[in-house]
Structures are given as C-alpha cells and as structure tokens.
Amino acid sequence: MKNYSVVGKRIKSFESVLRKAERKEIRVEGVLGEIHDLVGIRVVCNNREDISRFYELLRKSLYEDNIICIEDFVSKPQPSGYRAL
C-alpha cells in the first residue's frame, strides 16, 4: 500500500524567473544563485510519520549542498494553519 501520492509539480517558467529577478533586483547572471524555488513538488502523505519517511528518502536521493531547500511548516505551521514540509 502506498503511503503517499504525488498530486502536483511545477517548474517555474523562464518568464516567471525573469519577473521575479526583476522584482528582487537580481541580475540575470545571478538568478540561479538567488532564486531558490525553480522547481516544486506536492506530495500528500497519509500521516505525519510518512512525511518524515518521504523527506528522508528525498534527502538521501537529492540533497547535495543547494539542490533542495526545505521549508518546515509541519513543526511550525503558518498563522493560517497551513502545514507542509
């Protein structure tokens, strides 16, 4: 039985990257070093334990210096109540 489901993914478009760089006054040459949300995935897990297991699998598979950046809203939910990792 699967304990997770991939329900969405996105790769930021080139136009969106340029708009964000312009808004943040980032030179085009520095975009990859300054914009950290070029790719995103959404995985829905059945419970909190599955979130931790999925994170460990992802980290072991992809994490090298700055390949992935994790924002933890599970242990510290946003004021709206939104929780995610």
Image (cartoon, grey):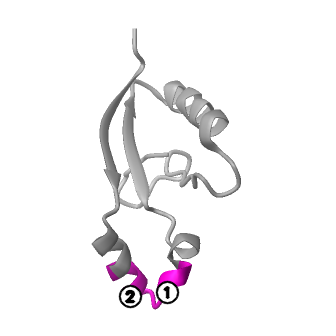
Specify few, some or many for label 2: CA neighbours under 10 Å numbering under 14, 14-19, or 20 or more. few
Q: SS of the residue at dot 2?
A: helix
The amino acid pointed to by label 1 is: Ile
Q: Which residue is under mark 2? A: 22
Q: SS of the residue at dot 1?
A: loop
Q: Which residue is under mark 1? A: 26
Q: Position of residue 71 (x, y in %)?
A: 54, 55
Considering only vertical position in the picture, is 48 above or below 28?
A: above
Considering only vertical position in the picture, is 43 above or below 10?
A: above
From which residue to which does the magenta span run?
Answer: 19-30
Spot the residue most to the front. 29
Residue 25 counted in the magenta span: yes
For the residues bearing labels 1 and 2, Cβ distance under 8 angstroms: yes
Q: Position of residue 82 (x, y in %)?
A: 37, 51
Q: Going 59% across and 72% down the picture, which residue do you hit?
A: 33
Compared across the picture, whether 64 is left or right of 15 comes to right
Compared across the picture, whether 67 is left or right of 15 comes to right
Compared across the picture, whether 35 is left or right of 16 comes to right
Residue 21 counted in the magenta span: yes
Q: Position of residue 52 (x, y in %)?
A: 58, 32
Q: Position of residue 2 (x, y in %)?
A: 40, 15
Considering only vertical position in the picture, is 37 above or below 47?
A: below
Name which quarter of the figure residue 46 lies in. top left
Residue 62 vs residue 4, the one in the foreground: 62
